[in-house]
Image: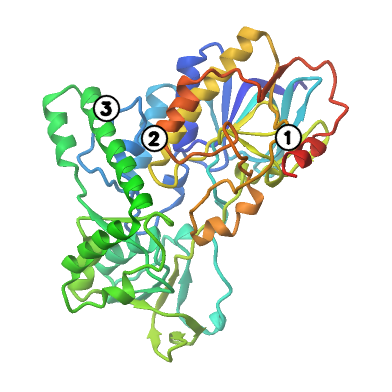
Amino acid sequence: MAVEHFDVLIMGAGLSGIGAAHHLQKLCPGKSYVILEQRERIGGTWDLFRYPGIRSDSDMLTMGYSFRPWTSPKAISPGDAIRDYITAAAHDEGINRNIRFGHKIERAEWSSPEAKWMVDALCDGERVSLTCNFLFSCAGYYRYSAGHTPEFPGASRFTGRIVHPQAWPEDLDYAGKRVVIIGSGATAVTLLPAMAKTAGRVTMLQRSPTYIVSVPEQDKIANWLRGVLPAMWAYRLSRWKNVGFMIYFYQLAQRFPNYVKSGLLKQVREELGPNFDVATHFTPSYNPWEQRLCLVPDADLFQAIKAGRAAVVTGHIATFTERGIQLESGEELEADIIVTATGLVLQTLGGAELSVDGSRVDPGQTLAYKGVMMSGVPNLASVFGYINASWTLKADLICAYVCRLLNVMERKGVRQVTPKSAGETATATFVENFTPGYMERALASWPKQGSKSPWRVYQNYIRDTISLKWSPVDNEALEFSNPPEASSQPVTEELAQSVK
């Protein structure tokens, strides 16, 4: 039985995967493609997470697709509306017909003589194999099967219920209950005001504070523009307005961190009043944008605290007890439910194993080419969005770049394109100057950065637009070839050389 073959295989039917399919249909209409999605629905992150209050952590005017206007009046959007937006994009363009659900990709093996990837996936417990000329990972950057949960002393003693937001149980009834949320990131600050509406009392327990910024749930300028201009024009203007502000604010924070820090803390004091201990509970030890800022729409977290329905406690856990959590200070937080909003587990390429011409690829031993490809690995690209702006801004650029690359390969009449490091050495991790725990735990297994372009990963939309959209695809760092047989030099040697 012949193995099914496609020009491009896309991993994942989330925000990035549907965007990739759109670009392929528009810019490479002659290319066949298939999307393999491990879950049973479109949406990726926005289908996986079902915890109370789940919402975007960026404004949807920049997190939406460049080709599809976001028309909801809510710029900070509930998760189900984002999932519906992605699903509608897939159905309206016929992308859904090319999705195969329930396919978890386990490994991919590149063969130079055949110029194709052999991709093995599991579907209903059975192995399914397909081949493709180009593999495009849009599987995100974290493990879907389980989030990060530290080993808490005494956790087995707790007589209540412990849940992780990534696996939120549908039957969890927290009405009138005492809830302790462990964590201070985007998930925790989303859960607190949502659960506080019906819970008896919600406490956010944090080891250290995070910068929290109140923003309007609705963008008044965008909504006004939508009323006087065609939808796409209004969307583009609103999008660039917000892109410009994000770039300005990030650069301001990099150059004048103390000034920005002072402004952020001033807003918190204005929200919570002069008697609240902002220094202890809302003043991080790091500078703004060394970790991602947490957005709260219309100050909902601060409103819940002021109303007495929620509280923030800063301290270290000594042990779980039968009734809750005892802190090192001796204080005990009683709880009926403990939510461990303790972060993600990062993984590359959806956890799939890679090999090239029989040699196993360790992504952590490669260099990142323009933040899109890996040195020594042919015909493969992956999407990793911004840490200081909306994910989709970078995803859109990468998807368009991959299409340009495919078209250049076709014009040249070549089957294989491989980033070659040519003596470039690793000088930095994939993401620099960004210190959240989920990043620090995993960056050793991610591609590294070199000393200069194109081996740098920029967190800058303007620079990436120049690099990925306006610069020529063909350059000395890319090797275009039609190899008649597998290289005599194993890929592992090339990868090892690239990081010496």
Percent of width and height locating residue 151 = 58, 74
Mark 3 / mark 2, whichever is N-terminal: 2
Q: Secondary structure at mark 1?
A: loop
Residue type at tag 3: Arg
Instruction: Using the image, tell me which numbered label, if any, was put on residue 423.
Output: 1
Q: Which residue: 36% across, 55% down?
A: 293
Percent of width and height locating residue 201 = 28, 77
Residue type at tag 1: Gly
Percent of width and height locating residue 229 = 15, 23
Disc 3 marks which residue?
236
> Label 3 to label 1, Cα distance in Å?
42 Å
| Residue 416, above or below 243 | above
Residue type at tag 2: Ile
> Label 1 to label 2, Cα distance in Å?
42 Å
Question: Is residue 376 visible in the rendered structure shown here?
Answer: yes
Disc 2 marks which residue?
86
Q: Badge 1 local density, few (<14 within 10 Å), some, or many (20+)?
A: few
Instruction: Using the image, tell me which numbered label, if any, was put on residue 449.
Output: none
Q: Secondary structure at mark 2?
A: helix
